[in-house]
Structures are given as structure tokens and as C-alpha cells.
Image (cartoon, coloured by chain):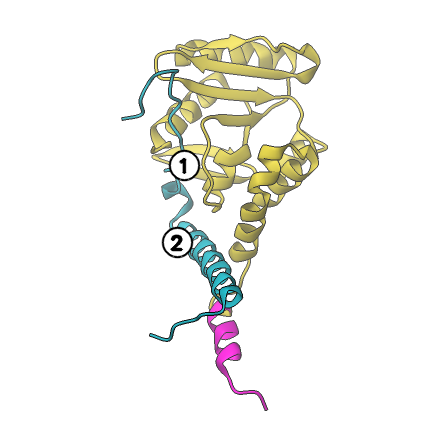
């Protein structure tokens, strides 16, 4: 593996990686039919409660 | 957490109460293809006396209570069920959307386990969040806008764009 020593190049690559990840996330979500896009609910946890 | 059981229950109760409402907010955005999350369900409706009576019937059928708005002019009616923390907000108006009828006409009908729900378009959700401008709205705007771009991207466009990038320049 080629080692990138330039910190700016590393951070740019990291930003591009993050952008790519978001695009993949959106594409994966949209690949499901609308009625299957239902795992979006966060559980409301009472004070001192646990979601587990 | 899977929202399907709650959406099915809400959809059935809305139908039983004959209450015309359109799902908006992050729940609607998720169904329309944006990978976002939420803790409640938001609906736009017309707060006529008849609809408020239907809203009470809807809440009764859910085993929930309707909380009166702290600021009555807000036209926000919060339906909450203590047993499982279900929260369904009904709004008479929202930022950036001029009429309920317009939003309803542009909405899609999505069927979940045989129950149909009217879900606002992603473009309307973005318009509303941009107009509201609260920090939590602004926080999701970018992902909603990118989701809308992806939804309208022609099939294979990304692959073509990548191929163009890789192609040697002449």
C-alpha cells in the first residue's frame, strides 16, 4: 500500500471517503421499496432508562 | 426500530376516524428514500371543528390522549400514548407550505401491510424544513437534498460519471 505522508491529502481522502459513504447509504436505502423503508424510529428512553 | 407496526396502526385508525391527514417530517422523508431517523410521526391536517372531533376519535381508538397546544395559535395537537411512548403530532400549518390541498395533491400514497398512508413528497419536506430553519431542520437538510438528487438521478448515471473521470483526457 502506498503511504500518504501529506496530512492534507489524507484529510481530503477522508472527506471523500465520508461523502462516498453517505451516497452509498442513500443508494442502499432507496434500493428498498418504500414500504420497506420503515426502520427509522428511535426509541424514546425515559430518564435513567435504557433502550436495551 | 421498525416503525411499520406503528404506521399500520396509525393508518388504520386514521381511516376508521375518516381523518384526512398527510404524513410529513422525517418519518415521511424516510419513506420517501432519505436515510433519516425520528422519534415521532408528524401529520398535516385541516384543523376544522369536524376534524378536531375526528382527531379525538382517532386518539380514543389508539388509547392515547390529545394534548392541547401550549400556544393555541400554533394549531399543534399532540397525540401521545403513555404505554409505549407513541407520539403523533398533527399540525394545521407548517412553514413553507401554503395549502393542505397542494401538499396532499403532491403527496404519494404508500401502502404498508395493506394500509395506505398519504406521504408528503421529499421536495415539500425539504421546502418546509428550509423555511422553518430550526437547527434540527438544518441538520438534516443536506441529506434530504442529496436523497432527492439520488432519487432523480437516471439509472447508471453514477457509473457513467465514474467512467468519465477514469477516461484519459484528450
Is B97 contained in the magenta span? Answer: no
- The quarter of the rendered structure image containing the C terminus of chain B is bottom right
| Range of residues picked out in magenta | B158-170
Q: Secondary structure at mark 1?
A: loop
Residue B26 is situated, as x and y percent measured from the top left of the image, at: 51, 35
The quadrant where residue B129 appears: top right
Q: Residues within 10 Å of mark 1 (few under 14, many from 20)?
A: many
Tell which subunit mark 1 falls on.
A
Question: Which residue is drawn at the image coordinates 54% and 9% (left, top)?
Answer: B67
B68 left or right of A38 in image:
right
Q: Residues within 10 Å of mark 2 (few under 14, many from 20)?
A: few
Question: Which residue is drawn at the image coordinates 59% and 12% (left, top)?
Answer: B52
Dominant SS of magenta comes to: helix
The quadrant where residue A43 appears: top left
Question: Which residue is drawn at the image coordinates 71% and 14% (left, top)?
Answer: B73
Residue A32 is situated, as x and y percent measured from the top left of the image, at: 38, 50
Question: Which residue is drawn at the image coordinates 57% and 39% (left, top)?
Answer: B139
Q: Height in image: B113 above or below B142?
A: above
Amino acid at each position: 500500500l502506498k503511504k500518504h505522508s501529506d496530512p492534507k491529502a489524507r484529510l481530503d481522502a477522508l472527506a471523500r471517503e465520508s461523502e462516498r459513504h453517505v451516497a452509498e447509504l442513500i443508494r442502499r436505502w432507496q434500493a428498498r421499496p418504500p414500504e420497506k423503508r420503515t426502520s427509522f424510529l428511535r426509541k424514546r428512553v425515559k430518564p435513567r432508562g435504557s433502550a436495551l | 426500530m421498525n416503525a411499520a407496526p406503528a404506521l399500520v396502526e396509525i393508518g388504520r385508525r386514521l381511516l376508521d376516524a375518516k381523518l384526512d391527514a398527510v404524513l410529513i417530517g422525517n418519518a415521511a422523508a424516510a419513506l420517501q428514500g432519505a436515510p433519516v431517523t425520528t422519534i415521532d410521526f408528524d401529520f398535516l391536517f385541516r384543523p376544522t371543528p369536524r376534524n378536531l372531533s375526528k382527531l379525538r376519535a382517532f386518539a380514543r381508538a389508539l388509547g392515547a390522549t390529545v394534548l392541547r397546544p401550549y400556544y393555541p395559535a400554533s394549531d399543534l395537537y399532540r397525540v401521545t400514548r403513555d404505554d409505549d411512548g407513541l407520539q403523533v403530532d398533527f399540525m394545521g400549518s407548517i412553514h413553507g407550505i401554503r395549502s393542505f390541498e397542494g401538499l396532499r395533491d403532491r403527496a404519494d400514497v404508500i401502502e404498508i401491510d395493506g394500509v395506505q398512508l398519504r406521504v408528503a413528497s421529499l421536495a415539500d419536506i425539504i421546502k418546509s424544513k428550509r423555511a422553518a430553519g430550526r437547527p434540527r431542520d438544518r441538520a438534516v437538510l443536506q441529506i434530504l437534498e442529496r436523497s432527492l438528487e439520488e432519487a432523480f438521478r437516471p439509472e447508471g448515471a453514477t457509473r457513467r460519471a465514474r467512467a468519465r473521470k477514469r477516461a484519459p483526457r484528450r
